[in-house]
Amino acid sequence: MSQHDSEQERHQQKMQKQKSNIDQGIAAAQDEQGVMLLLTGEGKGKSSSAFGMVMRSLGYGHKVGVVQFIKGVQLSGEEIFIREQHPEVELYQMATGFTWETQDKAGDIAAAEATWVVAERMLTDASLQLVVLDELTYMLGFKYLDESRVLAALAQRPAEQSVVVTGRGGGSALQALADTVAEIKDVKHAYKSGIKARKGVDY
């Protein structure tokens, strides 16, 4: 057997084993239900990933709802895209900006509570196949929202509804409730090198 044939045989055996493992995993995952994803961590890309799922869901003709906590003061590409290209998506923004900008705790709490009422309604709407709660974790970390109320709404949502929660932290109870938790690590960031945020990439 030539070296090439030997390498090909080893590669084929390796791929067959990998395929067998993947096939077994697919066969074992038979439950059909909505899922809750928590995208957290210090790195960039949590909201971007969530909006990628919005596009994916729209591709299948699904009905989508998006609630953005903190964001909404500065116009973003995803907001323009949704409002101009997909007005059927229900998009609600707290639109108070970052808490270190407002410096108004009482006002921020009132805005968070009003925004949560909208989110809570979406989490009872069985016609929404996907709900994105962007930057919700900060509202829990700052204690602007009651954690037990938030967790109860997430747990009691319609069985077929999927929800994506983004933001740093969020607490152990939120992680325990989520079906999938992905932590994004910030290995390197252009901002720390003095490079300005880029339209179409960062916002």
Image (cartoon, helix red, strand yellow):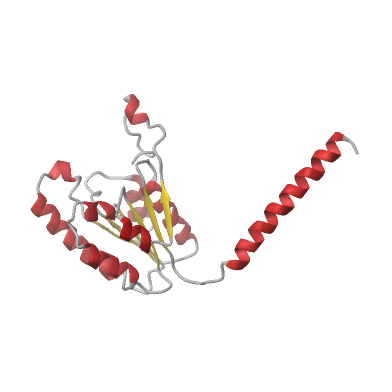
Residue nearest the observer in this picture, 118 or 25: 25
- 152 sits left or right of 54 in the view: left
Along the line of sight, which residue is nearer the eye, 178 or 68? 178
Q: Is residue 27 above or below residue 201?
A: below
- Name the quadrant containing residue 122: bottom left
Q: Which residue is outermost to the top?
A: 194
Q: Residue furthest right?
A: 1
Q: Position of residue 191 (x, y in %)?
A: 33, 30
Which x, y percent locates residue 199? 35, 37
Count the marks: how many? 0
Q: Position of residue 112 (x, y in %)?
A: 18, 58
Q: Is residue 118 visible?
A: no
Quadrant where the image shows the C terminus:
top left
Identify the residue at horizontal 31%, vertical 60% (top origin): 173
Q: Quadrant of the N terminus?
A: top right
**Residue 27 picture location, percent across and down:** 62, 67
Q: Nearer the viewer, residue 149 or 70?
A: 149
Seen at 61% across and 63% down, the residue is 26
Q: Tell me which residue sits at (31%, 69%) in the image.
A: 123
Q: Quadrant of residue 77?
A: top left
Of residues 51 and 46, the one nearer the viewer is: 46
Q: Can see residue 2?
A: yes
In the image, residue 132 sits, relative to residue 7, either above or below, namely below
Q: Residue at x 34, y 70 (%)?
A: 155
